[in-house]
């Protein structure tokens, strides 16, 4: 348990009013989600200032407010507890680091270009068969979300966190707070290559996880760039490798659809897809490191449930199967999702693909490669949405594929996509989060 006095000491906070001995329980940055005795954090964003809503939080039952943009407290609230800090975002990072130091428990940290969330979910499912587990929820994987996750710790036995990054230094910050005992890099792809310049730089940025790691690093040895740099990575930290093709510490053998064998143990992945065999291997290794029995590892992997909008299978009222993978996108993720679509029983297979963002000068090359992937999968209909998918369209045209439709944004596409879909079809929705393909899925499910 941590208290207001800890906040003041760790974050150099100033008590504007209230009780320094109050416990700090559940933290929230959203007044709409405030419950009685929660701690409200006023965070200043690009378009709003959360400090201005502290009265709403207190009216809804918050016991403590942490603010960085306040001079005077309204007389009505002077019997409440309000602490002013220099910067609320930095403050929750410092407080989370302090709280983490109070817990002598395993902490599993997952990063990578693709598959972070599904791997995190699968690891948590395995560990939950024998332990009480706290895991990253939704998209809480950045400099705000990770501290808020750690600040939720109560009596859990194990913490599983996801770590996202766009630039150098971000994983350094997150790993310093979380101090993981097991690290995972799912793969190195092209996500955020526009910010980092090359896959080599993406690898270096992902390897920042080692800076706070006190334990082994699990990596995918079939990922080309990690395989080619294996000796270098091993020089930085103890490494455990998983793989299918390259000789690794833990290998998936006798693969039959979603079932495979590792160390003479039969494992069934929840989805028939190569990417999920790698995810399952990681979960298997983490389970062994945390002394989970083999039957419970098998059970946890098979029964895993995924986070919303990540390979979520849905059925519309008129019998169309939707594969909702709208949370985010990259070239590697599209390839993996198309493999799942290809294996889905259906009359026709359709892909709705949006722009991949944050790829900088690689936008033309990557979106042309999307076109190549789409053609390789012999789809019945293709729908592209956004600006850079014009390069995808051009590639399709140059290769004589004509059954495609393009829209500048998702809102223009709703009616046409509805018209295109028939009973028995399977349709994949995949694009960067900002393209808002999830709005199309919501529209179709409501019709």
Image: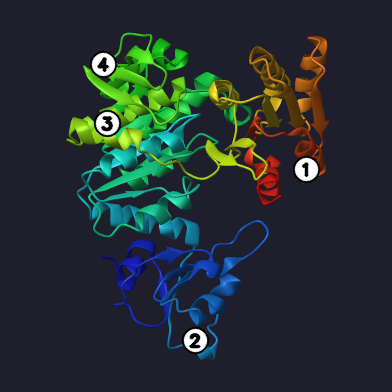
Q: Is residue 417 visible?
A: yes
Q: Is residue 159 above or below residue 9?
A: above
SS type, badge 1: helix
167 or 351, which is in the foreground?
Answer: 351
Q: Residues within 10 Å of mark 4 (few under 14, many from 20)?
A: some
Q: Earlier in the sequence, mark 2 or mark 1?
A: 2
Q: Is residue 320 above or below residue 156?
A: above
The numbered mark at residue 249 is 4
The residue under label 2 is 77
Residue 206 falls in image quadrant? top left
Q: Residue at x 51, y 82 (%)?
A: 59
The numbered mark at residue 298 is 3
Q: Residue at x 79, y 14 (%)?
A: 401
Q: Residues under labels 3 and 1: Cα distance?
A: 41 Å
The residue under label 1 is 414
Q: Position of residue 428 (x, y in %)?
A: 63, 31
Q: Position of residue 314 (x, y in %)?
A: 57, 41
């Amino acid at each position: 348990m941590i208290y207001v006095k800890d906040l003041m000491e760790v974050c150099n906070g100033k008590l504007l009013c209230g009780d320094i001995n109050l416990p700090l329980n559940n933290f929230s940055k959203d007044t709409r989600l405030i419950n009685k005795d929660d701690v409200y954090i006023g965070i200043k964003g690009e378009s709003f200032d959360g400090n201005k809503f502290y009265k709403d939080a207190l009216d809804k039952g918050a016991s403590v407010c942490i603010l960085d943009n306040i001079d005077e407290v309204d007389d009505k609230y002077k019997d409440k507890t309000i602490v002013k800090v220099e910067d609320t975002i930095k403050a929750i990072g410092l407080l989370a680091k302090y709280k983490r130091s109070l817990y002598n428990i395993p902490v599993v940290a997952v990063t990578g270009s693709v598959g972070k969330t599904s791997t995190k979910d699968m690891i948590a499912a395995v560990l939950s068969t024998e332990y009480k587990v706290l895991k990253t929820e939704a998209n809480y994987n950045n400099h705000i979300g990770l501290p808020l996750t750690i600040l939720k710790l109560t009596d859990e036995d194990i913490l599983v966190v996801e770590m996202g990054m766009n630039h150098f230094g971000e994983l350094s910050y997150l790993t310093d707070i979380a101090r993981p005992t097991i690290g995972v890099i799912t793969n190195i792809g092209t996500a955020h290559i526009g910010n980092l310049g090359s896959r080599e730089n993406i690898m270096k940025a992902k390897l920042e996880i080692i800076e706070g790691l006190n334990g082994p690093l699990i990596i995918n040895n079939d990922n080309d760039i990690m395989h080619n740099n294996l000796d270098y990575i091993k020089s930085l930290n103890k490494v455990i490798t998983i793989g299918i093709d390259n000789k690794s510490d833990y290998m998936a053998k006798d693969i039959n659809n979603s079932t495979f064998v590792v160390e003479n143990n039969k494992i069934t992945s929840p989805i028939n897809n190569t990417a999920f065999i790698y995810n399952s291997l990681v979960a298997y290794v983490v389970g062994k490191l945390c002394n989970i029995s083999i039957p419970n590892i098998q059970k946890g992997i098979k029964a895993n449930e995924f986070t919303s909008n990540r390979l979520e299978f849905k059925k519309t009222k008129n019998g169309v199967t939707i594969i909702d993978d709208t949370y985010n996108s990259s070239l590697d993720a599209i390839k993996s999702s198309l493999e799942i679509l290809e294996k889905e029983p259906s009359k026709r297979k359709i892909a709705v693909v949006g722009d991949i963002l944050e790829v900088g000068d690689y936008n033309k090359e990557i979106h042309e490669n999307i076109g190549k992937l789409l053609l390789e999968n012999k789809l019945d209909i293709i729908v592209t949405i956004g600006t850079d998918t014009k390069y995808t369209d051009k590639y399709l045209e140059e290769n004589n594929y004509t059954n495609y439709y393009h829209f500048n944004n998702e809102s223009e596409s709703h009616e046409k996509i509805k018209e295109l879909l028939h009973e028995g079809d399977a349709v994949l929705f995949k694009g960067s989060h900002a393209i808002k393909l999830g709005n199309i899925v919501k529209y179709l499910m409501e019709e």
